[in-house]
Image (cartoon, helix red, strand yellow):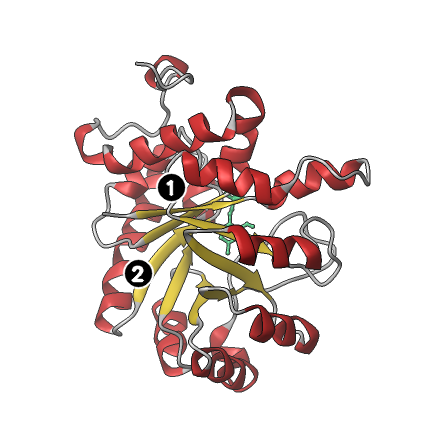
């Protein structure tokens, strides 16, 4: 069954908005697990704009599910990852000016810099994943660089503005899953997935893991993290039972108290 990794970065974003000590991302991670999260994802950015080093350490000590650290290949961050030993590292491109990770890593271009990092991480038993766009050459380059998994950027689907664009993006995603499997890779998905748009993506067979952040944290501010995660898991697991809707009406979302 497909796994849900909940990205809790924006819990820390709220905390940092006031330079305060709440809300705590580790508490949010625990609530996410109680709602059924199969993993917790965080991005330790070079500028520490949300999650900080202490959060990473507390998450490592408290997360009972799979801990997935998103990171650049900055040497200081790589050193932290090697010491921290999360279950998985997802290597992502990082630019200080960006609001969130924009697009995938250019593994083809960066393979000489990426491969040694991947090797070091693999050597200490950390699973490695490359966040890339659904481009066959990037998938093949990821396998060649030593990654065990790829996380396919779903942004072109999420940002599509009409049905034709969405259909085309879904076809590209389906092809990326096939290419990934043929390369012997585990295939994850992430970026821009929401309660309203996730169903058609979840209907594509072959995904192992979804990493979803902003939409779950946004919903959690209103209904609580456990309910928000429970509902996203239900959408993922029941995707095949639903008509191929791109936009779910609010009534299609479960009672946030989880009592229905
Ligand atoms: N996967 C990766 C690699 C990301 O960088 C992000 C954004 O932090 C996500 C998934 C989650 O994206 P979103 O917040 O749009 O759900």
Up-down: is 221 above or below 135? above
Query: What residue is rendered at 34% in x and 38% in y?
Result: 164
Residue 198 visible in the picture: yes
Location of residue 54 by image quarter: bottom right
Q: Position of residue 146 (x, y in %)?
A: 39, 81
Name the N-terminal-most of marks 2 and 1.
1
Front residue of 3 and 106: 3
Q: Residue furthest right?
A: 19
Which quadrant of the figure contains the C terminus?
A: top left
Which residue is drawn at the image coordinates 43% and 26% (left, top)? 227
Q: Are marks 2 and 1 in contact (CB under 8 Å)?
A: no
The nearer-to-camera label among 2 and 1 is 2
The answer to whether residue 206 is above or below residue 74 is above
Q: Secondary structure at mark 1?
A: helix
Residue at point 64% right, 62% down? 94
Horizontally, residue 144 falls left or right of residue 80, namely left
Q: Is residue 145 above or below residue 151?
A: below
Is residue 102 in sight in this rendering? Answer: no
The residue wearing badge 2 is 176
Find residue 206 and report its horizontal and vertical position in percent.
23, 54
Which residue in the structure is indicated by mark 1? 165
The Cα–Cα distance between marks 2 and 1, rounded to whole angstroms, is: 17 Å
Residue 58 numbered tag: none
Q: Residue furthest front?
A: 61
Q: Residue lying farthest left?
A: 241
- Left or right: 217 as drawn, with respect to 64: right
- Residue at 44% across / 72% down in the picture? 126
- Write down the quadrant of residue 18 in the picture: top right
The x, y position of residue 160, in whole percent, is 44, 39
Is residue 178 positioned above or below 213 on the image? below
Q: Badge 2, how many Cα within 10 Å: few under 14, some, many 20+?
A: many
């Amino acid at each position: 069954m497909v796994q849900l990794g909940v990205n809790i970065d924006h819990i820390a974003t709220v905390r940092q908005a006031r330079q305060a000590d709440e809300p705590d991302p580790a508490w949010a991670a625990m609530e996410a697990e109680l709602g059924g999260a199969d993993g917790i994802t965080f991005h330790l950015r070079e500028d520490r704009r949300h999650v900080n080093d202490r959060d990473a350490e507390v998450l490592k000590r408290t997360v009972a599910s799979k801990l997935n650290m998103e990171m650049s290949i900055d040497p200081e961050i790589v050193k932290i990852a090697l010491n921290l030993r999360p279950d998985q590292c997802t290597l992502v491109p990082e630019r200080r000016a960006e609001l969130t990770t924009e697009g995938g890593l250019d593994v083809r271009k960066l393979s000489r810099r990426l491969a040694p990092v991947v090797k070091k991480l693999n050597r200490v038993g950390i699973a490695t994943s490359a966040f890339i766009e659904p481009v066959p050459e990037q998938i093949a380059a990821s396998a060649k660089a030593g990654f065990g998994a790829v996380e396919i950027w779903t942004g072109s689907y999420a940002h599509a503005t009409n049905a034709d664009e969405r259909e085309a993006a879904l076809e590209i995603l389906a092809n990326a899953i096939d290419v990934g499997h043929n390369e012997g890779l585990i295939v994850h998905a992430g970026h821009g997935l929401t309660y309203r748009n996730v169903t058609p993506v979840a209907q594509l067979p072959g995904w192992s893991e979804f990493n979803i952040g902003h939409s779950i944290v946004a919903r959690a501010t209103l209904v609580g993290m456990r309910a928000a995660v429970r509902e996203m898991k239900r959408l993922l697991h029941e995707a095949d039972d639903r008509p191929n809707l791109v936009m779910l009406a609010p009534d299609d979302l479960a009672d946030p108290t989880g009592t229905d």
